[in-house]
Image: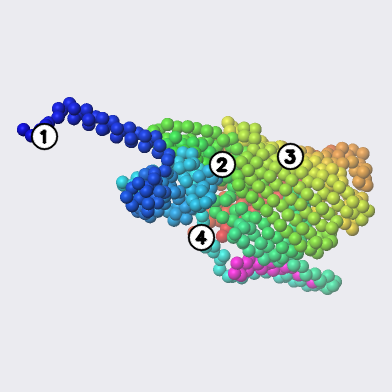
């Protein structure tokens, strides 16, 4: 046997193999421990021409390249999309807004603000809470799980229909001739749709033998919708002012926000928020009536498009796919002037007073309001050379305590004998009791003695001339409404108004004048099948202690004649002064 071919013992070869394996493991382990160091590509044949970033990306979660992926959102297939993965996407995908929009996915900038890459102008969706991004290279699929709160509705892209150009005029003319005189009267109402403008006008004219000739244009206004601002532009004879400060007729222009211009924007739309532990159905009910029902993906959600037209607790029920239910109660009170969260309104108007106004010089008015979650804020001002005023107001939701509104105004009026300043305050509260469905409301207003709103101001008079009558100081209003078992509804309200002493305003004061007026009203209404019945009563007492009252009953009966629907109504009324009045009428198409 050749000595060069001497066989080595098996145990010795196994020992050498073990030593070699151990050395390789140590080398690999040290390589892993220093993974943070950049690999020197020059040690690899041809490695000097390789981009280290590309090499690092190949070893990341996502390899760079172009993929045709099956895209799904919250378990719903969207279709195939081309996905370009760059070396910068090796650890987390960054999707551009254009790519998402093309796929029909519109994300909330507020929810994903932490994941926005301003340099690359794309969204790293995985950085937002409760979001999952699963890109499976093997199956060429991209699955996105985004909470409802992270998604927004698709932007509207519809063509507005401004109607067909048309012209309509209603007119009335009559004449009368007698032994001693003759007279004639005519009126006309014009409505026209011209392009994107709607023209409305009203005019009257009269003449007689006595030379009393008169012609008046009561209204001439051209309006059009400004889509980009969701506002109405009006030109012509308009009204300039503020709901609290007063207004006056002007020839001018106005631009006012119209929040009801688009469908679905009617009513007050609060925010109903919650968290779905998995795919769940969310249901909203109020007073036993379902307002909304829809599926939500896992994660936080908010329902923002359910309008409320009446007060009352809203119950939100979240039902998971396992049958478990979570309920949450939102006590809400709807008041006039509330704006939905994120909604705003504005109004700007300018013009010169019309013939019916006592003001001189131009009039300018501006106002703005904004809605927050449970809070609405407003401010405004009206300016004229002789009258200036500013107003501010707020509507605040108090949860189980209802809602309250507060408004205040301050005005300066320049009379012929000097300037006077005054203020006005209004407070209101309302609440709907969920247990009995009882509606409660209380309001109070107060104005200083020298406060004058713009509607009744005349700069050509002195302050005493302007204030010959009684001036209101305080006014209280309270009301209650109660449905009874779905059979009928009752409502009652009362008011009290107090005045400043007449002696300070130059008016004659009666000895029994207590400076207060009070009143009360009540109604009962019901509907039997399609027939409506209403009963009403009211009474009041004036400052001299004199009482008066009135009562009425009305019934409305719908009927069909020649396949057209009509309604007949009859009202019977009576009062303290005696006598009974009956009126009846028929209305239809």
What residue is drawn where x is 54% and y is 62%? 160
Instruction: Answer with mark 4 or mark 3, whichever residue precedes in sequence.
Output: 4
Which one is closest to the eye, mark 4 or mark 3? 4
**Residue 165 x %, y %:** 58, 70
Q: Which residues are magenta?
A: 187-207
Q: CA distance from mark 4 to mark 2?
A: 26 Å
Task: Look at the numbered disc 1 and give the secondary structure of its residue.
Answer: helix
**Residue 139 x %, y %:** 31, 47
Density class for disc 2 (Cα within 10 Å; few <14, some 14-19, many ≥20) is some
What residue is drawn where x is 73% and y is 39%? 427
Q: CA distance from mark 3 to mark 2?
A: 25 Å
Viewport quadrant of the C terminus: bottom right
Task: Look at the numbered disc 4 and give the secondary structure of its residue.
Answer: loop
- Tell me if residue 201 is in the magenta stretch: yes
Q: CA distance from mark 1 to mark 3?
A: 112 Å
Query: Label 3 belongs to which residue?
Result: 427
Q: CA distance from mark 4 to mark 3?
A: 42 Å
Q: Based on the displayed image, in which of its 4 quarters is residue 426 positioned?
A: top right
**Which of the numbered marks, if any, corresponds to residue 158?**
4
Query: Label 2 belongs to which residue?
Result: 271
**Which of the numbered marks, if any, corresponds to residue 31?**
none
Instruction: Answer with mark 1 or mark 4, whichever residue precedes in sequence.
Output: 1
Dominant secondary structure, magenta: strand
Image: 192 above or below 112: below
> Does the image show residue 207?
yes
Residue 20 is left or right of residue 318, and the answer is left
Query: Label 1 belongs to which residue?
Result: 5
Instruction: Answer with mark 4 or mark 2, whichever residue precedes in sequence.
Output: 4
Instruction: Answer with mark 3 or mark 2, whichever residue precedes in sequence.
Output: 2
Instruction: Answer with mark 1 or mark 3, whichever residue precedes in sequence.
Output: 1
């Amino acid at each position: 046997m050749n000595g060069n071919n001497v066989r080595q013992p098996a145990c010795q070869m196994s020992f050498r193999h073990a030593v070699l394996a151990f050395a390789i493991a140590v080398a690999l382990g040290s390589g892993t421990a220093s993974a943070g160091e950049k690999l020197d590509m020059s040690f690899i044949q041809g490695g000097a021409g390789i981009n280290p970033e590309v090499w690092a990306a190949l070893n990341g979660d996502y390899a760079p390249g172009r993929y045709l992926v099956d895209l799904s959102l919250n378990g719903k297939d969207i279709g195939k999309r081309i996905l370009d993965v760059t070396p910068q996407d090796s650890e987390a995908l960054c999707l551009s807004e254009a790519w998402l929009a093309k796929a029909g996915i519109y994300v909330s900038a507020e929810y994903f603000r932490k994941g926005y890459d301003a340099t690359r102008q794309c969204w790293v969706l995985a950085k937002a809470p409760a979001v999952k991004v699963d890109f499976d290279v093997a199956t060429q699929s991209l699955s996105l799980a985004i909470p409802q709160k992270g998604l927004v509705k698709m932007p509207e892209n519809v063509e507005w229909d401004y109607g067909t150009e048309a012209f309509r005029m209603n007119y009335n003319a009559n004449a009368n001739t007698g032994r001693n005189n003759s007279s004639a009267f005519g009126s006309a109402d014009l409505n026209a749709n011209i392009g994107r403008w709607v023209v409305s006008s009203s005019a009257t004219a009269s003449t007689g033998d006595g030379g009393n000739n008169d012609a008046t244009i009561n209204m001439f206004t051209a309006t059009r919708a400004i889509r980009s601002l969701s506002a109405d532009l009006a030109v012509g004879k308009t009204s300039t002012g503020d709901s609290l400060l007063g207004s006056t007729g002007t020839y001018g222009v106005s631009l006012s926000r119209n929040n009801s211009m688009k469908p679905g924007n009617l009513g007050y739309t609060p925010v109903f928020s919650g968290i779905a532990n998995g795919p769940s159905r969310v249901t909203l009910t109020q007073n036993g009536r379902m307002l909304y029902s829809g599926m939500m993906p896992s994660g936080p959600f908010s329902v923002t498009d359910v309008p409320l037209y009446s007060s009352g607790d809203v119950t939100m029920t979240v039902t998971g796919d396992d049958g478990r239910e979570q309920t949450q109660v939102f006590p809400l009170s709807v008041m006039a002037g509330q704006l939905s969260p994120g909604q705003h309104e504005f109004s700007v108007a300018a013009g010169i007073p019309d013939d019916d106004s006592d003001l001189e010089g131009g009039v300018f008015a501006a106002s703005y309001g904004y809605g927050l979650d449970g809070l609405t804020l407003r401010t405004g001002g009206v300016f004229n050379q002789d009258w200036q005023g500013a107003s501010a107001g707020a509507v605040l939701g108090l949860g189980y305590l209802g809602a309250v509104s507060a408004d205040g105004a301050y005005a300066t009026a320049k009379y012929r004998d000097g300037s006077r300043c005054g203020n006005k305050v209004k407070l209101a509260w309302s609440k709907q009791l969920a247990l009995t469905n009882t509606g409660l409301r209380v309001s109070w207003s107060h104005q200083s003695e020298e406060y004058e709103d713009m509607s009744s101001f005349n700069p050509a008079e002195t302050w005493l001339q302007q204030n010959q009558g009684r001036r209101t100081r305080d006014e209280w209003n309270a009301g209650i409404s109660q449905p009874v078992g779905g059979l009928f509804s009752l409502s009652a309200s009362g008011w009290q108004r107090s005045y400043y002493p007449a002696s300070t305003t130059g008016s004659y004061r009666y000895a029994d004048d207590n400076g207060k007026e009070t009143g009360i009203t009540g109604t009962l209404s019901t509907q039997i099948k399609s027939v409506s019945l209403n009963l009403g009563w009211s009474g009041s007492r004036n400052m001299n202690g004199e009482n008066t009252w009135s009562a009425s009953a009305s019934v409305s009966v719908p009927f069909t004649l020649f396949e057209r629907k009509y309604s007949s109504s009859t009202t019977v009324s009576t009062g303290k002064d005696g006598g009974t009045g009956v009126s009846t009428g028929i209305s239809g198409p």
